Image (tube, rainbow, N blue to C red):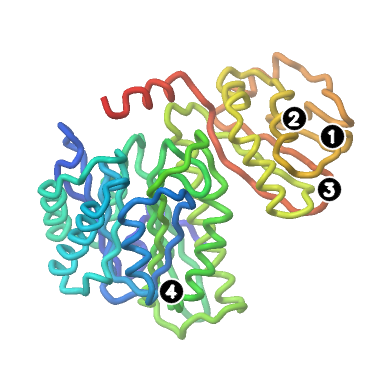
Amino acid sequence: MDVIADGNVCAPRGFRAAGALGGIKAESTKLDVALVASDRIASAAAVYTTNRVQAAPLHLCREYLQDGKAHVVVLNSGNANACTGDQGLDNARAMSVQVGQGLGVRNEDVLVCSTGVIGVQLDMEAVQKGIAGVLSGLQDDGGDDAAVAIMTTDTKPKTSALSLKIGDEIVHVGGMSKGSGMIAPNMATMLGVITTDANVPPDLLREILSLAVKRSFNCITVDGDMSTNDTVIALANGAAGGPPLEPNTSSSAALAEAIEMVCRDLARQIARDGEGATKLVSIEVVGAASEDEARQVGLSVANSNLVKTAVFGRDPNWGRILCAMGYAGVPMDPQNVAVYLCDTQIYGSGSGLPFNHKALVEAMSAADIPIVIDLASGTARAEIFTCDLSYDYVRINAEYTT
């Protein structure tokens, strides 16, 4: 597989994108409406938040995706269109109607995503202005603008793409996502769009996306809060040619690996861009009895505010890590586990180990902080990504709507 430098959702053949300013975000000049469109009907799949309070666009996507097909994804930032009742659902549907009419496709083939403030009705005049802008601005190289247009408190756009050979065809996978705060499985206040020109039936695409999300977006946490709007959508338009991929083959496995790689790259970018974050923290759990138990332990540590503040303060306080491991609900023997921080073993054989405190504090000044936990219970592993918890996180969220 080859990484495509500066690649995005337009890397696969047959996809165009755009970003435009509608004015949804009050007194803002930032792009706030995005469009990702295939030049032909595509297989489509989506994974959604497990929050029981779900935004109007999620209900609409579920309705529209019953046939496993879609043509376009329209997204807005600045307003979540969540907890907005029947009017919110009507507004989401109106977005699909406007895009469908503008592109000459069925309304039901236009998927809708929103992100932003919860509980406020969409300013449909601003939304319609933004949609008109993206319809007229669709380009083969519009992926970067689309990625910018879905940002909320993000400090940078998040894109990724790669290519690989499947059979006789060169296949591409691209993606974009947003997310910075309210980040916790499953999945986060995040939106993601994955595109590929592979020829993939809807059922297989759904299976591939579900596993990729489990191992990527569902392995990140910034603050433990779960959003109402999380959605990752995958479109596969078959423009690369070749016969439809079949399950349980080397070809479908190769595509699944590629989609997972793009999703993991986007997930890392989200964790690194956590609200107020100064460090990316990777928590690798090895020696687990199962992948699910490894994830459970890793997420418990990643969601610990005490661990996250210790990382921010460069405090090698291993007791906080052990504590979070202990309440994860996974069977383990503290006498057998080992913990490493920045490549230094700090715990083993049931107690803390001597280490060079000054050197470890210095190592924790780095932008990337690795934590490795060996449960000594099996051979399964998982890797979780999070960030530190800084003073700026409080400031950003205290001022979110003011």
In the rendered view of the protein, which quadrant contains the C terminus? top left
Can you tell which of label 2 and label 4 is closer to the viewer? 2
For the residue labelled by badge 2, is the local secondary structure a helix, a strand or a loop? helix
Q: Report the amino acid beneath label 1.
A: Pro
For the residue labelled by badge 3, is the local secondary structure a helix, a strand or a loop? loop
Disc 1 target residue: 334
Furthest residue toward bottom: 243
The dot on residue 322 is 2
For the residue labelled by badge 1, is the local secondary structure a helix, a strand or a loop? loop
- The numbered mark, 3 or 4, whose residue comes first in the sequence reads 4
Q: CA distance from mark 1 to mark 2?
A: 9 Å
Q: CA distance from mark 3 to mark 4?
A: 39 Å
Furthest residue toward front: 86
Q: Report the amino acid beneath label 3.
A: Ser
- The numbered mark, 3 or 1, whose residue comes first in the sequence reads 1
**Few, some or many residues within 10 Å of mark 1 (<14, 14–19, 20+):** some
Please, is residue 326 above or below residue 149 in the view?
above
Q: Report the amino acid beneath label 2.
A: Leu
Give the residue displayed 81% in from the left and 28% down from the top: 347
**Few, some or many residues within 10 Å of mark 3 (<14, 14–19, 20+):** some
Can you tell which of label 4 and label 1 is closer to the viewer? 1
